[in-house]
Amino acid sequence: MTIIQNRYNALFGAAVLSIAIWLIHGYLGAIAWAGIVALASWPLYRKFIAHLPAKAKRWAPLLFTLLVTLLFLVPLGYILIVIGHEASLLAGALVEAQTRGLPPPSWVGRIPFAGESILAWWNKVLSTPGGFSIWFHQVGQGPALDWLRFFGVEIVHRSIVLALTLLALYFLYRDGETLAMRLLSLTEKVLGTPGKRHASRAVDTIRGTVNGLILVGIAEGLLLGLAYALAGLPSPALWGALTGLLAIIPFGMPALFGTASLILLAQGNQSAALLILIWGTLVMLVSDHVVRPMLIGDSAELPLIWIILGILGGIETFGLLGLFLGPVIMATMVSLWREWTNVRDHPV
């Protein structure tokens, strides 16, 4: 093949790839999520296959995909059930407020900073029969209905994305080794030996980020959930689940256990509020400044400042997916910087 043919072949391939990406751009997030989950869980998948009987190995991709699905859906289902229960209680309270008026709890006025404003709003809207209906029409029934329609459309869209993610995950488990060899071969052809090294570091960074964010977030949710239960906070399991979820996002966890402390303080339980604040701060400091940097930084050879910037910048640019893409991009950038400046052993 001549040089001109090679160039035209490369241009044709780039054009086809660009059109294909444009065609499925709305579902690239599902593919990216499937890739992240597959890369992070691949060592477990290999161990899973090793313990299966020979006749059952052909079903390994499907079985492991079902296990991963249950791992995600069971906690999500529990959270939705608890939220549904709380929502039904809230709906009953709103009906009572609409018909007979609902007096405020004694601790509402003691909420720090916002207690007086909340108490005044409660007396005007919830304590007065029919007040909630008047307030609802004042804030605008149209925007509320538009929001509900948007929420319904989003649920349908997210369900489709989740289904596509799980389908892509199945094919990645089934054909992952072949795909990995092809991608490594392509990377080596385009970028040479350094390309394979960068690809390997990207995989290590994704696994380290999943361990540092997801697993540590689950541990934080369990530790804080137990503390909420001991402190007497209502619905401690829901608070613990939300804490574990927000712990994945930088600076999200303090907002939740801080709110829990304020609620306990407003209820007159000062000692429990102080203990939740101290325990939450201790757990956050150990996880954010010891455990996470060790898991993410060691796997990616990435200093703490670049981990934080990668996560925050990734969230701002790519949304939740940026939690994992951000550190990968920063790890590749730092790797290139060290390679080009020939100071690989330097910490920055």
Image (cartoon, grey):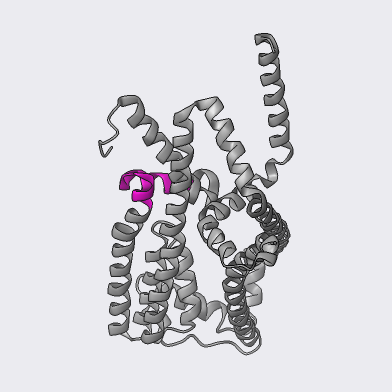
Give the quarter of the figure containing the C terminus.
top left
What quarter of the picture does the N terminus occupy? top right
Residue sitting nearer the eye, 115 or 235: 235
What is the magenta segment's predominant secondary structure?
Answer: helix
Residue 256: x and y in percent read 42, 69
| Residue 206 in view in this figure | yes
First to last magenta residue range: 296-314
Residue ID at (66%, 20%): 10
Check if residue 299 falls in the magenta segment.
Answer: yes
Res. 276 image quadrant: bottom left
x 63%, y 64%: residue: 64
Q: Residue 212 occupies which quadrant of the picture?
A: bottom left
Q: Can residue 151 be seen in this view?
A: no
Residue at 63% over, 43% down: 179
Would you say 303 lies left or right of 168 here? left
Q: Position of residue 156 (x, y in %)?
A: 73, 60
Would residue 302 appear left or right of 96 to someone viewing this image? left
Q: Which of 185 and 270 is in front in this view?
A: 185
Count of numbered circles in the view: 0
Q: Where is residue 35 in the image (x, y as percent from the top left)?
A: 59, 49
Left or right: where does residue 171 sit relative to residue 255? Answer: right
Q: Is 191 situated above or below 218? A: above
Check residue 54 for magenta coloring.
Answer: no
